[in-house]
Image (spheres, grey):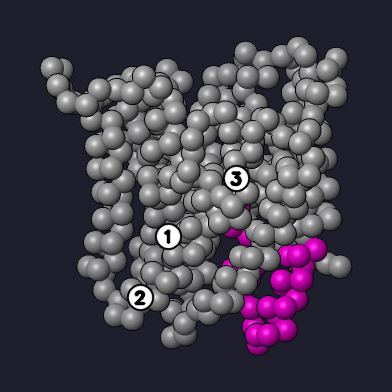
Amino acid sequence: MTRSNSGRLPGLDTLRAVAIVAVMLYHLKPFLPESMAVVAQFGWMGVDLFFVLSGYLIGLQLLKPYASGDRPSIWSFYRRRAYRILPAYVVVLWIYLVFPGWRESSVLPPLWQFLTFTVNLFFVDFSQHAFSHVWSLCVEEHFYLVLPLLVIWVMRRPSLRKTALLIGGVVLFGICFRGYKLLPLIAPSGWSGRVVPDDFGTFYYRYLYYPTYSRLDGLVVGVTLALVRIFRPAGWSWLARRGHAALVVGIAFTGAVCWMFRSDGMGDATKAAAWGTVIGYPLLAAGLGLLVVSSVSSDGWLSRFRVPGSRLLATLAFSLYLTHKEVAHLDRRYLISLTEARDAKTVVVYAVTCLLGAGVLYGLVERPFMVLRDRFERRTAKTVDAEMLREPAL
């Protein structure tokens, strides 16, 4: 059973690796050395990087056929997504249901929310925290469901104006929605409107961080990059020749958002974090989008060099995403002497066991189903573009 990886790009692998490591650091921050806290507190940005990567790669899959006068097959797209996502996801969900000791938190949200990918829309509070990290997969699934239909609708009568209005409208809606929810914090002094909720952390995650309609910035930026690459090749060529500049500006944008959340303000009722939530998400998406440009450019450090270990981490990214919190929980439960101290030894234990757990899931479930998918696609089509089989972020 073989599967070709010839279509992989080292720059994208590096970004996937950075994204999954960042997410893991963020989730495991309470159990890691204090010296890692400065980096780990911004690990939530790894999810936004996943969103940009998915928007770009999925956008390419759906838009590329139009460049040759063809149309994408919606059912083929949905079938590929099902092969890619559902087997590993269902297996991990089954483990959560059958083995309560596997859960990193005692209370699991209702099963129907996992089966309908609506966990992110019905967040109650942090007491129901088991498998909560699947919220971002829910966002991705909503994106996979809607984008093909949206593309077909827009491409019936393609128009630069209509496309720009749609993209701008989605970004503007997110800014306005988050601004409305955070109005008591960002309004001028003396504002006598709504008061800030006492349990601001729960409020923040319920209405601003988890819901799909509040987290579309990264996906929109990724799709925009795909649009430029397919339909504005001259503009894309101009970008692709400036990989170093894209990297520098992208890091600068991302650093600005880090400054906005400098007080570890995810869910903290501070004015800086509020402004970061309102305008920082699109700024972060733009910065990460520039990193993606650099990673696939003809002139850029990310595209020229393969970081050691990045291919392995990129390959296991989805399995790591699904299992890292649970494996670390088992480490703390059964390897007490190795994980009780927040030191380098604990980091090594988490790293090794999480990679092993992800490797088992990937080898037994994820990879076999992707092989089946690739064989089926090649059997039912004369040619299958490598881009169609290249893996998105999740």
The residue pinned by badge 2 equals 153
* Mark 2 or mark 1: whose residue is earlier in sequence: 2
Measure the C-alpha gap from mark 2 to mark 1: 15 Å
Instruction: Look at discs 3 and 1 and give the one toward the viewer.
Output: 3
Counting from the top left corner in percent of width and height, residue 31 is at 68, 19
Instruction: Look at discs 2 and 3 and give the one toward the viewer.
Output: 3
Q: Please, what secondary structure does the residue beneath circle 1 have?
A: helix
Three-letter code for the amino acid on which mark 1 is drawn: Val
* Magenta span: 368-394
Q: Within 10 angstroms of label 1, few (less than 14), some, or many (20 or more) residues?
A: many
In the rendered structure, the answer to whether residue 369 lies left or right of residue 119 reads: right
The residue pinned by badge 3 equals 110
Answer whether residue 379 is magenta in the image. Answer: yes
Residue 362, placed above or below residue 381:
above
Q: Within 10 angstroms of label 2, few (less than 14), some, or many (20 or more) residues?
A: few
Residue 356, placed above or below residue 154:
above
Measure the C-alpha gap from mark 2 to mark 3: 35 Å
**Residue 211: quarter of image:** top left
The residue pinned by badge 1 equals 223
Three-letter code for the amino acid on which mark 3 is drawn: Pro
Counting from the top left corner in percent of width and height, residue 160 is at 26, 69
Residue 81 seen anywhere in this rendered image of the structure? yes
